[in-house]
Amino acid sequence: MTIHDVIGIGFGPANLALAIALEEQEAGLSARFLEARTEPAWQPGMLLDGSDIQNHPSRDLVSLRNPRSRYSFLNYLHENGRLLEHLNLPIEFPLRKEYARYITWVARQFDHVVDYGRRAGEVRVVERDGEQLYEVTADTGETYLGRTLVVGPGRTPYVPEPFASAGSRRVFHLTDYLFRLAEFTADRAPESVAVIGGSQSAAELTLDLAHRFPGARVRNLVRSFSLRLKDTSPFSEEGYFPAFTDYYHQVSPEARRRLDAYMHATNYSSVDGDVLKELYLLIYEQRLDGDQKVSVDGNLQAVTAAEQDGKVVLELRELNTGAVETDSFDLVVVATGFRDLGPGPHQELFPQVIKDVAGRFRTEESGALQVSADYALEALDEAAGTPPLFLNGLCESSHGIGDAGSFSLLSLRAQTLLDGIRKRAGAASSTASATASA
């Protein structure tokens, strides 16, 4: 069986950026990536009409690391004959649809290093000819051997209670939005839809539903007072600089939590100004016309959720007064984000795909994995010869807001990972040579 220098789990933007760095720097390392999807795709369930990516287009897969790369967003536009038209667009950020096509365009040029339709199931450490390796078994039964493992499957969708236990396909996470709409609205438009959460995505989904189904009642249910304006201050945006990542990684867990609290509104539970204005104007005009169908209702928490007679019935509690109401919807879209790594109730201690080897690595006092500056996990017993394992795009709790699933530091992180892989590969070779000489 072929032994690869690098096995990558997942081939979304994070590991795609690493594959580009491996090629462009002629690293001399063989790599194989496993991707659960049957073809390259980025956020296919959320490619809403008119929605943008919320970050500068040059914060793409490569440009911060290598501005001369042929895999840049700018070159994608040039090679597809859309550069001049795109530069003439009256928008600040690219359309999400176009960025998705850019990512697919790049990914297709790396088909030779990816096996699509392979969901990584079991990961374990095995020995072959005296060498410790990772053996990754896909759900197809195929196995892969590698000297280094890079885990980049994307973050796990967070579906809180009572929605997680509702047991209804009419209740779904935003990542399934377009697919579930196709499933449940092919024959008739919904009469009512609830959108749960106060995020950018929640506001965008509320607008999309209002435009897509103008006759439907749409309620955006928010736990806080209402929707909040995103912090887009250029000073706060420096949290997405590599210097902040370095600073964040070296401070105490308590200091990290303080920094998290400050940075929260740059990415979470907040909405871009243009989206807020459009949504508020829509609601105002509906009130003016005496036909309000869309609303943003704050201070509400769902206590129960259950499907009854083709409807999802929610019991809602007003958080400040304690008043309880019941409402029913054809569909409930849960726009509550994703799980980060950590010990908290909304987090997970490790990516589930590495559950069988997670016990080989050090943890912090909280129980969270101890992640080094170059995104490698630290082995508990160095003498055991545990091969290097890196996390790609999962480390907000150890590296700060720049690791929160955005493109902001994607290409620079790929460089850090590549440097770490080379360093550890060199150290392993030196150890092997010394052992052989002895």
Image (cartoon, rainbow, N blue to C red):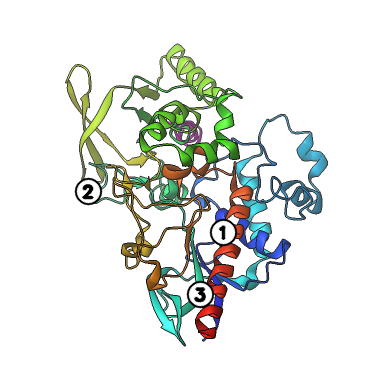
Residue matched to label 2:
165
Residue matched to label 1:
420
User: Residue 216: image x %, image y %?
Assistant: 40, 32
Residue matched to label 3:
146
How crowded pointer 1 is (Cα within 10 Å; few <14, some 14-19, many 20+) is rated as some
Nearest the viewer among 285 and 86 is 86
User: Residue 117: image x %, image y %?
Assistant: 49, 70
Q: Secondary structure at mark 1?
A: helix
Circle nearer the viewer, 3 or 1: 1
**Dot 3 amino acid type:** Gly
User: Residue 160: image x %, image y %?
Assistant: 28, 42
In the depicted structure, whether residue 416 falls above or below residue 301: below
State left or right for residue 67 relative to residue 95. right
Q: Secondary structure at mark 3?
A: strand
Circle nearer the viewer, 3 or 2: 3
Q: Residue at x 78, y 36 (%)?
A: 87
Q: Quadrant of residue 269?
A: top left
> Going by the picture, which residue comes out furthest to the front?
438
* Residues shaded magenta: 203-216
Q: Residue at x 37, y 41 (%)?
A: 333
